[in-house]
Image (tube, helix red, strand yellow):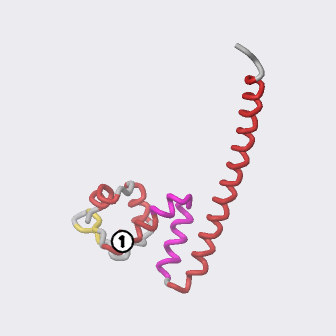
Amino acid sequence: MTMQEASKRYHIPMHILQEYQRWGLCGAVKNVMSDWQYDDADLERLSIIMTLHDIGFTAEEVETYLRLLLEGDHTAAQRLSMLERKRSAALEEIHFKERQLQRLDYLRHEIRKTQGGKKG
């Protein structure tokens, strides 16, 4: 499958595919007639890359994670640690947003309270 075909079929932005190619992690990817060919293992790794991007990993973090993944199971603790840090950051962000919503709801409540006492 070519880069363009992979991009269209799996809805992977071209810049992600080009990034993957630049990292030199496309072990089984072959440059055939000036177009990259992806095998199933490449597509699986690209799926992981998309997931990591979607959960907020930077390009540098994605590359680090993928290099660790390719090193094998002995890097599982390092990869888990990366995921745990990202999860903690996401939870902190959620809690911050919850506090914002509480403040926003308080202000809305105060406005409605004053409007309820007035006629007209």
Side of 68 relative to 81 (left or right): left
* Residue 64 counted in the magenta span: yes
Side of 108 relative to 68 (left or right): right
Q: Which residue is farthest left? A: 33
- Residue 42 in the image, given as x and y percentages of width and height: 36, 71
The one of 80 and 118 positioned closer to us in this rendering? 118
Side of 74 relative to 44 (left or right): right
Residue at 35% x, 69% y is 43
Image quarter hosting the C terminus: top right
> In the image, which residues are magenta?
50-71
The one of 112 and 92 positioned closer to us in this rendering? 112
The one of 64 and 56 positioned closer to us in this rendering? 56
- Residue 9 in the image, given as x and y percentages of width and height: 29, 58
Task: Using the image, determine if residue 70 lies above or below residue 97.
Answer: below
| Neighbours of disc 1 within 10 Å: few (<14), some (14-19), many (20+) | some
Task: Using the image, determine if residue 33 lies above or below residue 41.
Answer: above
Q: Which residue is farthest bottom? A: 74
Amino acid at pointer 1: Asp
Image quarter hosting the N terminus: bottom left
Query: Quadrant location of residue 110?
Result: top right
Residue at 51% x, 68% y is 63
* Residue 22 counted in the magenta span: no
Residue wearing tag 1: 42
Secondary structure mostly taken by the magenta-highlighted segment of the chain: helix
Task: Using the image, determine if residue 76 lies above or below residue 59.
Answer: below
